[in-house]
Image (cartoon, rainbow, N blue to C red):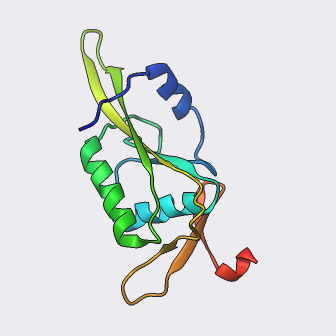
Amino acid sequence: MFSPKKNNEWIKSLLAKPEGLHLDYKQSLSSQRKIAKTLLSFANTEGGTVVVGVSDRKQILGIDPEEEMFMANEAITKYCAPSFPVTFEVYEVQLHTEPVSTEEKYLLLIHVPKSDRGPHALAEENQEPVYYRRKHDRSVPFQLSDLH
């Protein structure tokens, strides 16, 4: 179970920030492989936050936080070698859709600390592990030899 935080002003200021080295927006976590790549790229770089429930145009779509937390944890377990810890924050956002109605939607923030147990690889069966790091607003592959 989760207890959502409420801070519309803080969420507005967060959504004013562009995607970058420490921030990524996702509508939902539909692909465990894709989210694993984003999460481990943050862990391999300087850490960061994934905001789930927001469109590319920064519209709050809302999500089921428990389902998205499950997807993120499964992604790390299945695809990240070695695995690493993340923390979750759930925000309840009140959207005023009409003069009289208020709609509540949830956002999930996945906080990924910079890892001291890395580098972390995207590991898939019968494939070579691929290492990713964050560069600007993208997760880009790198070679272990690049680290030396």
Q: Going by the picture, which residue comes out furthest to the right?
A: 148
Q: Nearer the viewer, residue 146 or 11?
A: 146
Label total for image: 0
Q: Residue at x 37, y 41 (%)?
A: 53
Q: Going by the picture, which residue comes out furthest to the bottom?
A: 126
Q: Residue at x 38, y 34 (%)?
A: 60
Q: Going by the picture, which residue comes out furthest to the top?
A: 100
- In which quarter of the view is residue 80 placed? bottom left
Above/below status of 105 relative to 26? above
Above/below status of 133 relative to 9? below
Asked whether, in this view, residue 129 is left or right of residue 94, the answer is: right
Q: Is residue 86 visible?
A: yes
Q: Nearer the viewer, residue 4 or 105?
A: 4
Q: Nearer the viewer, residue 84 or 9?
A: 84
Q: Residue at x 47, y 40 (%)?
A: 57
Q: Nearer the viewer, residue 67 or 97?
A: 67
Asked whether, in this view, residue 67 is left or right of residue 112, the answer is: left
Q: Find residue 125 and report its horizontal and vertical position in percent.
A: 36, 85
Q: Find residue 18 and report its horizontal and vertical position in percent.
A: 60, 41
Q: Residue at x 61, y 65 (%)?
A: 133
- In which quarter of the view is residue 77 placed? bottom left
Work out which quarter of the rendered image holds the N terminus and state it: top left
Work out which quarter of the rendered image holds the C terminus and state it: bottom right
Above/below status of 121 relative to 111? below
Q: Find residue 34 and report its horizontal and vertical position in percent.
A: 42, 64
Q: Going by the picture, which residue comes out furthest to the front?
A: 117
Asked whether, in this view, residue 23 is left or right of residue 5, the answer is: right
Q: Is residue 30 visible?
A: no
Q: Find residue 29 and report its horizontal and vertical position in percent.
A: 34, 54
Asked whether, in this view, residue 95 is left or right of residue 114, the answer is: left
